[in-house]
Image: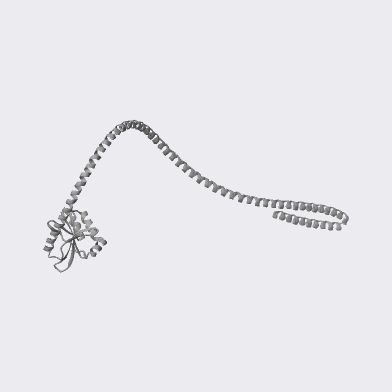
Amino acid sequence: MAQTEIRLSEIEEHMREIAREVMAEQADVLRKEIMEAELGKLRLEMDAHLRHIREAINALAEAQKRTEERVSELAEAQRRTEERVSELAEAQRRTEERLERLEATVQALAEAQKRTEERVNELAEAQRRTEERLERLEATVQALTEAQRRTEERVNELAEAQRRTEETVRQLVEAQRRMEESLARLDRQLAETNKQVGQLANRLGLDLEVDAEEILREVLKKKGFELLQEPFPIVIDGEADVVAPVRSPEGETFWVLVEVKGRVRRSEVGDWLRQLNRPDFQERLREMQVEKPYLPYIFGLRIYLGVEKLAAEAGLGVLDYRGERLAPRPWR
């Protein structure tokens, strides 16, 4: 459009130059004709020349009109082109957006494809392991089938053995009946024996307590203790077989407590220590005016290994038929 306007300006300037040149030439001719007295002829020629000029100007005007129409058409075409370009730009933008979305979708599909391939590989590996397991299962089923056959044979054998066992059980039941009758007789005999043993144990227990009391008297005498009261037994939810108040050479008063056993093992020591430490046992002793400090002993005809170590750790004295094996510590 700008180039067309420049071109039109150049044409107009050129036409003006032509007109000036023509006017100058005609003026010269006119002056010559006036000078030559041919003014009429010059006017005719000038009219013709001017007619030609008007025709040329009209032709130029027509060309200018066509040029302006063409320029208008070009401007309209330019406007449509710009609109089309805008539409194309918008379409390009939408296309780029679609391409971006498409690229993102393709990327996601590629990632999904990668995961799918990995999953397929995992499934392939799982399938391989499954086939291996099936092969092992088939082998196991075959082995179980063979084992079932052998089991059925064994069941038949066991059925025969069961028949023989039932016969044996019948015989055993009869033997059991005879044994129960024998055991009933033995129970009656054992009851009588237990009665006799109980009487003997009571007699033996009394003898042990008497022995423990005599040995305690000798031990106290050797250690310089004064016996303030004759020893006696007490029973208070747990028995102390020999109990006696004594006075030490230093003048301090103690209560001697002696547990009497035929055999003294660590378990007997533990039982006596637990009883001595029971608050209710100590409370009952106080109710009977048996007060701390105590000198606790355990007496036995046989003292087993480990007893003296356990007793020493607890401060418990140990007596046997020879005398004092371990002195007690006062329990305050």
As drawn, 136 above or below 20: above
| Figure colour scheme | one colour
Image coordinates for residue 301, horizontal then vertical, percent: 15, 54
Image quadrant holding the C terminus, namely bottom left
Image coordinates for residue 229, horizontal then vertical, percent: 16, 65
- Residue at 56% over, 47% down: 102
Side of 19 where 217 appears, left or right: left
As drawn, 82 above or below 231: above
Image coordinates for residue 3, horizontal then vertical, percent: 70, 54
As drawn, 118 above or below 254: above
> Which of 247 and 73 lies nearest the eye of the viewer?
247
Does residue 12 appear anywhere in the picture? yes
Side of 71 where 240 appears, left or right: left
Does residue 304 appear anywhere in the picture? no
> Which of 312 and 145 lies nearest the eye of the viewer?
312
Image quadrant holding the N terminus, namely bottom right
Image coordinates for residue 232, horizontal then vertical, percent: 17, 61
Quadrant of the rendered image containing residue 164: top left
> Which of 34 and 236 lies nearest the eye of the viewer?
236
